Image (cartoon, rainbow, N blue to C red):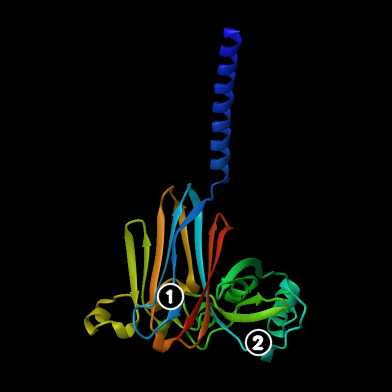
Amino acid sequence: MAIRRELVGILLIALTASTIVTLFMAGEKAKRNVEVLENTFPQEIKFSGRNTFSLGVIARKPLSVLQVEFASLHANDISSLSPERGKFGREAVLSLSCVSTLYEMADSLGVSPIEYEMKVERNKTKRDMYVFDFSGILRRIVGDDLLGGYAGGGVTSVYAAVFNETGIGYFYSGFKDFFYPRNSTITELTITYNDESQTYKRQKELSKAEIQSGVPTVMDAPHVGSLIFDDVKKDDTVRIAFSVDRAAVPFRDGLELIGILSEGQADYRLANFMFAS
């Protein structure tokens, strides 16, 4: 009996050890390529204070390409759009002429917009949201200056519908960028990769000496809110932080969309709702 008990003990130890190894391997396999360390934003954009947005990301394994993309959207008057009641998701958004027109144009060119759905929380209520992003297509046609509103009024390229029980409850449209329009709203933007930082300032924030010395302005920051990092090492970190001037914000109800992609695939889709008081 003593021998049998000893064998049972050995088997239990072996089984426990193999289970731990299996769980460890499963945990390693399931780990994301990147992890979000920070995602903060002012839920209420005020005239007082810095109104700072910040995103921090760390690579959990070596990556050939890491992308971080921002879009700045604002709410539309839903009644003027006359959405069809009882429709949800992709079908509901494509029933809106502003989206269907762009979709048909893209289809005629043989290209497709980026589409995705996600769960969001707006006013402490969980909702479904569907997004169409035509920025990649339009960027090739009109260029960054027109698309981002750096020359002219900008080209609306991103649409997001938030659903309630009857269909589209809120509809947002906007631009691919850190914040729109960046040349007047963003007072300061800093991009940090590991220990290296680059800061961009709104031109009116710069002294004559800074302007003469070539201090970069927010217009020199990566265009259309798209950042690409190559040959990223494990534990490399990226942080993007910027502050906005409430007096220059042209909307009351806003939505920030952030995409974090590694090796061309989306690891995270973030949606941050905000209100300008």
Q: Helix or strand or loop: what does disc 2 sit on?
A: helix
State which quarter of the image contains the N terminus: top right
Q: Quadrant of residue 95?
A: bottom right
Residue 178 in percent (x, y) is at 46, 74
Label 2 sits on what residue type? Ile
| Numbered mark located on residue 42 in the image | 1
View extreme (left): residue? 209
In this rendering, would 45 be left or right of 195?
right
Q: Residue at x 41, y 59 (%)?
A: 238
Mark 2 lies on residue? 78
Frontmost residue, 106 versus 125: 125
Q: Quadrant of residue 115?
A: bottom right
Residue 76 in percent (x, y) is at 60, 86
Q: Is residue 18 above or below residue 91?
A: above
In this rendering, would 275 be left or right of 88?
left
In this rendering, would 269 be left or right of 197?
right
Residue 196 in percent (x, y) is at 32, 60
Label 1 sits on what residue type? Pro
Q: Quadrant of residue 50?
A: bottom left
Residue 131 in percent (x, y) is at 64, 72
Frontmost residue, 247 versus 146: 247
In this rendering, would 69 be left or right of 186?
right
Disc 2 packing (10 Å; few <14; some 14–19; many ≥20) = few
Q: Is residue 26 above or below residue 229?
A: above
Between the C-alphas of marks 1 and 2, the distance is: 24 Å
Q: Residue at x 34, y 80 (%)?
A: 49
Q: Helix or strand or loop: what does disc 1 sit on?
A: loop
State which quarter of the image contains the C terminus: bottom left
Frontmost residue, 11 versus 155: 11
Earlier sequence position, callout 1 versus callout 2: 1
View extreme (bottom): residue? 80
